[in-house]
Amino acid sequence: MAIFMKNKVALLTGSEGLLGPAFGTILLDKGAKGVVFLGSERANQTNKELAEKYGEERVMLYNCDITKHESIKAGFEEAKAKYERIDVVCNCGSAWDEIEWVNTIEVSLHGVIHGTRLALEYLERHGLLVNVTSVAAMTLAPYLPIISACKAAVLAYTKTVAKYDPVAKDRQIRVNVFCPCPMDGDEMSTAVLAEEKVKQHATITLTKLKTKPASVVADALMKLVDQDRHDETLYVHGELGPIFAADDTDDFRRKYRASTVVKNL
């Protein structure tokens, strides 16, 4: 069931990058009763601009550690207490650091798993859960083995939840995956690499990848809210734009590998 955001509530976890604020803006412009940002104090410094623009009644900022279950659960509790409902949960926590790789796994994978389990507990019937990963889930991202592994794990985890989780089935919660391309100025362009000797080559590679503005990527993400889709993966390719892959990902792999961006790396 598609969700019309007027008077609905969305909760975003780990929105430290560019996508969270851009997506939150669209939700608010579409009439959301509330948009809740659960994340670090640094992330919510950025989101303060939205609170100032739309008002604290509609924008809730809650500082928490998304890698700790009890910390993020307290945020869900506060959101439910304030708005009495949660209709959309979008887990978009991500870290791009190959040196501090344990933290990368905790944020990019454990944080998403915590957010998913809590979403299934707190979402309204017919709600929507979207886990954000990356096109890196589909490819062997050069020089980013930990990050690629996390992105692929989120994709596999979310698809499994969508197909088999009994709570999602019973409450008819739609579960989807969003795999965006790099955004203009996002974390991928400043990834911390493990080996100094490959940094120059990696920088050249990243400059060849087509990026999209965060607002364009957020518009694509709204398709998962506006359209009645479940157990689907939406990719945003820098060259090809949004691509839905309903079950398997062969179609995307074929299109992605045929693109001139990948050929020219």
Image: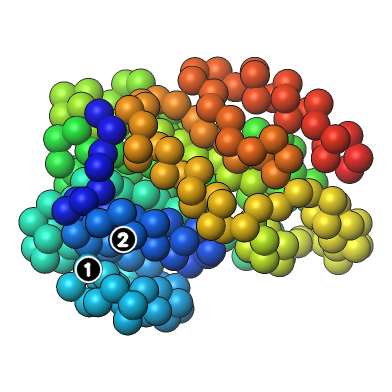
**What residue appears at the point 70 percent right and 44 percent down from the top-left corner?**
238
Residue name at image x 73 percent, y 40 percent:
239
Amino acid type, label 1: Arg
Q: Are marks 1 and 2 in contact (CB under 8 Å)?
A: yes
User: Which percent across, then down, holds residue 252?
Assistant: 65, 25
On the image, the x and y values in percent for residue 158 come to 42, 34
**Foreground of the two, 128 or 196:** 128
Query: Is 25 or 133 nearer to us in this picture?
Result: 25
Tell me where residue 253 sits by quadrant: top right
Mark 1 or mark 2: whose residue is earlier in sequence: 2
Q: Is residue 250 above or below residue 73?
A: above
Q: The C terminus appears in which quarter of the rendering?
A: top right
**Residue position marked by numbered label 2 in the rendering:** 28
Residue highlighted by disc 1: 58
Q: Which secondary structure, mark 2?
A: helix
- Three-letter residue code for mark 2: Leu
How far across and down, in percent of the image, does residue 31 sit?
Answer: 25, 56
Above or below 25: residue 121 = above
